[in-house]
Image (spheres, rainbow, N blue to C red):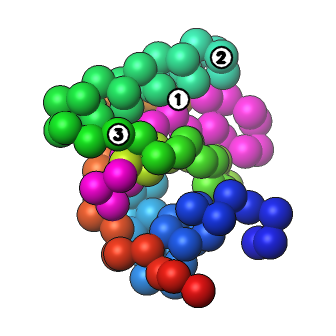
Amino acid sequence: MSDLNPMASATLFTDQNKDLLAKMLEKALLQPLVPMEPAAAQKYMERVAVRTATDNSTDIELFQTVQMSSSESTYVMRVALFENHLAMGLDIMDAENGQFFIPESCPVCQLAEPTIN
């Protein structure tokens, strides 16, 4: 993890938050998903994240992709990390076939406070 963004290492990838990210992916996969081209999905979902940040009087600290596996498949989910320690799941890619999807509504979770080393 030494090459990862230090903010992602201190927040999204801590042991306390791994289960939250898995639940975020599970919640997104349980709802209707719309297939979309990769560039369009990224552009659209990043605009959704910016609007959500504005609506909640916060800013986006970073966008990060997270690879997760379930018993059936492996997925890559783009996550927006907000300054108020919320994370929002954005678009999802099925790592086996490369298809991108956007969820009907983006799951949001409260992350544990960042660790400082």
Q: Residue at x 82, y 63 (%)?
A: 3
Image position, residue 28 (x, y; %): 38, 46
Q: Earlier in the sequence, mark 3 or mark 2?
A: 2
Q: Quadrant of the C terminus?
A: bottom right
Check disc 3 and report its element: helix, strand or loop: loop
Image position, residue 37 (x, y; %): 64, 15
Q: 58 and 109: which one is in front?
A: 58
Residue 59 got which mark?
3
Residue that badge 2 annotates:
39
Q: Are marks 3 and 2 in contact (CB under 8 Å)?
A: no
Q: Earlier in the sequence, mark 2 or mark 1?
A: 2
96 in relation to 114, above or below: above
In three-dimensional space, the C-alpha distance between marks 2 and 1, rounded to whole angstroms, equals 11 Å
In three-dimensional space, the C-alpha distance between marks 3 and 2, rounded to whole angstroms, equals 22 Å
Residue that badge 1 annotates:
101
In three-dimensional space, the C-alpha distance between marks 1 and 3, rounded to whole angstroms, equals 24 Å
Check disc 1 and report its element: helix, strand or loop: strand
Q: Quadrant of the N terminus?
A: bottom right
Categorize mark 3 by other alpha carbons within 10 Å: few (<14), some (14-19), many (20+).
some
Residue found farthest to the right: 3
Image position, residue 74 (x, y; %): 67, 55
Q: 20 and 64: which one is in front?
A: 64
Q: Residue at x 80, y 72 (%)?
A: 2
- The residue range painted magenta reads 83-100
Q: Are marks 2 and 1 in contact (CB under 8 Å)?
A: no
* Type of amino acid under label 1: Phe
Name the mark nearer the viewer: 2 or 1. 2
Check disc 2 and report its element: helix, strand or loop: helix
Image position, residue 82 (x, y; %): 37, 48
Name the mark nearer the viewer: 3 or 2. 3
